[in-house]
Image (spheres, helix red, strand yellow):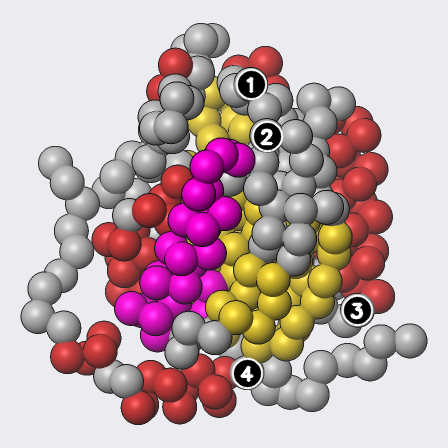
Amino acid sequence: MTTPPVRPAVRVTVGQLAVSGDHAANREVVRRTIGTAAAAHADVLVLPEYASGFDPRGTGPEHAEPLDGPFVSLLRERAAREGVAVVAGTTLPGASPERAVNAVVAVDAGGDLVGVYRKVHLYDAFGHRESERLEPGPVDADPLVLDVAGLRLGVLTCYDLRFPESARRVVDAGADVLVVPAAWAAGPLKDLHWSTLATARAIENTAVVVAVGQAGKGVTGRSLVVGPDGATGLELGTEPEVRTVDLDPGALAEVRAGNPSLANRRYRVVPAG
């Protein structure tokens, strides 16, 4: 039986799931994964982008559910039952029937929905056009930061990883850990981009990066946990897998003391108009 973390460590379960267009089946996988995280005594479970329903050809309004719909309701019920916080990607209805919103929800260990991040950077690159199906979130929305067992987790998603100012804005809001649910599209050099960008965001922000990718058709998997010094503490393959790691706030503090780049900076990040 898995023993609880030795405090002050914060235990994170990485849920690299394969997600289909069958919402009920996806909820069952998520339900089991929350149970796995609880059995590992995790403080928080991180699930991929689009964890409620996914189409590798493009996920749009046909997969949208409201915040009081079945997926988020399941997260809240199981989080409260198991005592595990959950960060997960989902799809919300947009302002019109033709558009949806790519979102990440954060649920605390008591089952409360503590925040929603609506993806700012839509993936209009490498032959994909998310903007044909999705509407972006407001660039000036407050960053989503979740307190978990003494660490602050800031939320980005997928394509945001390519924009260092997004990560820095979340760190400015107090994040120690950058949580990045993703369905990182497969393609030439995309694995390299994924790992390089996650490592860069960790080093330049002296922050832990927990980048959780979807497994399956059209996506790369290869979830990562990267330390604030750039060292990779966990790297998964391409198949569905659930793994648990401990994060050490003391080690994070030591890196930030030795590399005070956040204190030495001379520019600030502000939303574009």
Of the numbered discs 3 and 1, the one sitting upstream in the chain is 3
Of callouts 3 and 4, the N-terminal one: 3
Amino acid under disc 1: Arg
According to the picture, the residue beneath numbered tag 3 turns out to be: 40
In this rendering, the label closer to the viewer, 3 or 1: 1
Do the residues bearing badges 4 and 2 touch, measured as CB atoms within 8 Å? no
Residue 269, percent from left and from top: 17, 56
Give the residue at mark 1.
Answer: 57
Distance between mark 2 and mark 1 Cα atoms: 8 Å
In percent of the image, x 61 and y 22: which residue is there? 55
* Marks 2, 1: nearer the viewer: 2
- Residue 34 position in % (x across, y down): 76, 53
For disc 4, the marked residue is 248
Residues tagged 2 and 1 counted as in contact (Cβ below 8 A): yes
Q: What residue type is labelled 3?
A: Ala
Compare marks 2 and 1 and give the one earlier in the sequence: 1
Q: Residue 6 carries which label?
A: none
List the single residue furthest toward the left: 266
The main secondary structure of the magenta stretch is: helix
Task: Determine which residue is flagged by label 2.
Answer: 218
Residue at 64 percent across and 87 percent down: it is: 7
State which tag comes first along the sequence, 4 or 2.
Answer: 2
Q: Position of residue 30 (x, y in %)?
A: 75, 43
Badges 3 and 4: C-beta atoms under 8 Å apart?
A: no
**In the rendered structure, which segment of residues is drawn in magenta?**
185-209
Circles 3 and 1: CB atoms closer than 8 Å = no
89 on left or right of 206:
right
> Which three-letter amino acid code belongs to the residue tagged 2?
Gly
Figure quadrant of the C terminus: top left
